[in-house]
Image (tube, helix red, strand yellow):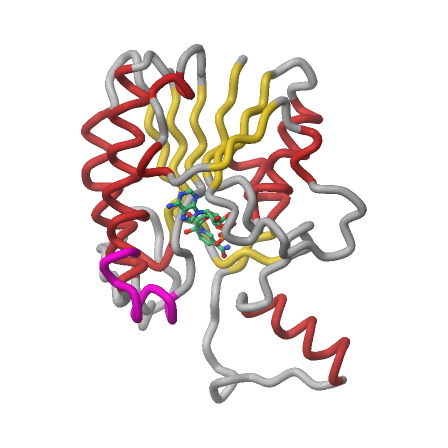
């Protein structure tokens, strides 16, 4: 089995790669990433990508179809993935998170890839005023980032057929350790504050609930 991990050099990618390497020791794992955060390592003694069979550096927009030759599964993690950046650079967010995600799926389908897994987000539901949302709840994307995920899902899902499986996983906010740790995520920020300043700063009155998922569980869900 040949698995292409696009956007693998961020927060979730290294954890996913380790999980897949363990679950499928004989699979060919290929990474593809622009390397925006390649140098943002925490405590790693070597690049986490050494467990892959191949790492390709490139923009998802320019992913050559030869990269998809013989690939069975594409996992697409590539995104501009936080709200402040998304709101400031809306066009780039839509271009990468939506248009490039759809374009990649189209190329993958044409190349005979069997399964395309898209990292979507539970932010597609917006605020839950009356209790927790479920997969059948209506969508209410409140940010450019959330809108980009809704737009991508809407075009990806109809691409599925008997030979091409499309899975959109609406992940909660991630937490937990990674070789490339993101500290803009709420629980990681709390832990970092507690450890470094002995203080957790809550940016609200403390009543809001928020769904969270450990990165290792994200990897299991993708698997
Ligand atoms: N972390 C979370 O809490 C969370 C929650 C829900 C969904 N997601 C989704 O999961 C995916 C991965 O999240 P993450 O936390 O690892 O994000 P991240 O920002 O840490 O990693 C994203 C990766 O995509 C790469 N990338 C961005 N633009 C690219 C481009 N044009 N071409 C090639 N590579 C590009 C970056 O270099 C980076 O390595 C994203 O799609 C994100 O929206 C994340």
Indicate the quadrant containing the N terminus: top left, top right, bottom left or bottom right.
top right
Q: Give the residue at the far bottom of this rendering.
A: 205
> Residue 149: percent from the left, percent from the top?
29, 50
Determine the residue positioned at 58% across, 61% down: 182
Determine the residue positioned at 60% across, 43% down: 217
Depth check: give the residue in front, 4 or 194.
4
> Residue 89: percent from the left, percent from the top?
29, 65
Determine the residue positioned at 33% across, 12% down: 112
Q: How many marks?
A: 0
Could you tell whether 15 is left or right of 218 in the image? right
Please determine whether, in this image, residue 33 is positioned above or below residue 207. Answer: above
Indicate the quadrant containing the C terminus: top left, top right, bottom left or bottom right.
top right
Please determine whether, in this image, residue 46 is positioned above or below residue 128. Answer: above
Depth check: give the residue in front, 179 or 169.
179
Q: Quadrant of residue 104?
A: top left
Depth check: give the residue in front, 201 or 52.
52
> Residue 71: percent from the left, percent from the top?
44, 16
Answer whether residue 52 is magenta in the image: no
Determine the residue positioned at 36% across, 30% down: 63
Q: Name the main secondary structure of what is drawn in magenta.
A: helix
Which segment did they paint magenta? Answer: 83-92
């Amino acid at each position: 089995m040949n698995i292409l991990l696009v956007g693998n050099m961020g927060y979730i990618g290294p954890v996913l790669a380790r999980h897949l390497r363990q679950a499928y020791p004989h699979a060919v794992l290929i990474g593809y990433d622009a390397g925006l955060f390649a140098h943002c390592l925490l405590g790693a003694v070597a690049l986490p990508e050494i467990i892959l069979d191949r790492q390709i550096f490139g923009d998802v927009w320019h992913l050559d179809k030869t990269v998809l030759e013989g690939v069975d599964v594409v996992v697409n993690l590539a995104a501009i993935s936080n709200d402040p950046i998304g709101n400031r650079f809306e066009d780039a967010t839509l271009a990468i998170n939506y248009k490039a995600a759809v374009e990649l799926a189209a190329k993958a389908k044409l190349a005979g890839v069997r399964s395309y897994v898209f990292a979507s987000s539970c932010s597609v539901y917006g605020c839950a005023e009356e209790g927790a949302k479920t997969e059948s709840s209506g969508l209410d994307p409140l940010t450019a980032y959330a809108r980009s995920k809704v737009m991508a899902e809407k075009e990806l899902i109809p691409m599925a057929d008997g030979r091409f499986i499309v899975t959109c996983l609406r992940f909660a906010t991630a937490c937990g350790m990674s070789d490339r740790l993101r500290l803009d995520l709420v629980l990681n920020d709390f832990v970092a504050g507690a450890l470094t300043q002995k203080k957790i700063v809550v940016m609200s009155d403390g009543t809001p609930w928020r769904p969270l998922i450990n990165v290792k569980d994200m990897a299991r869900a993708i698997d």
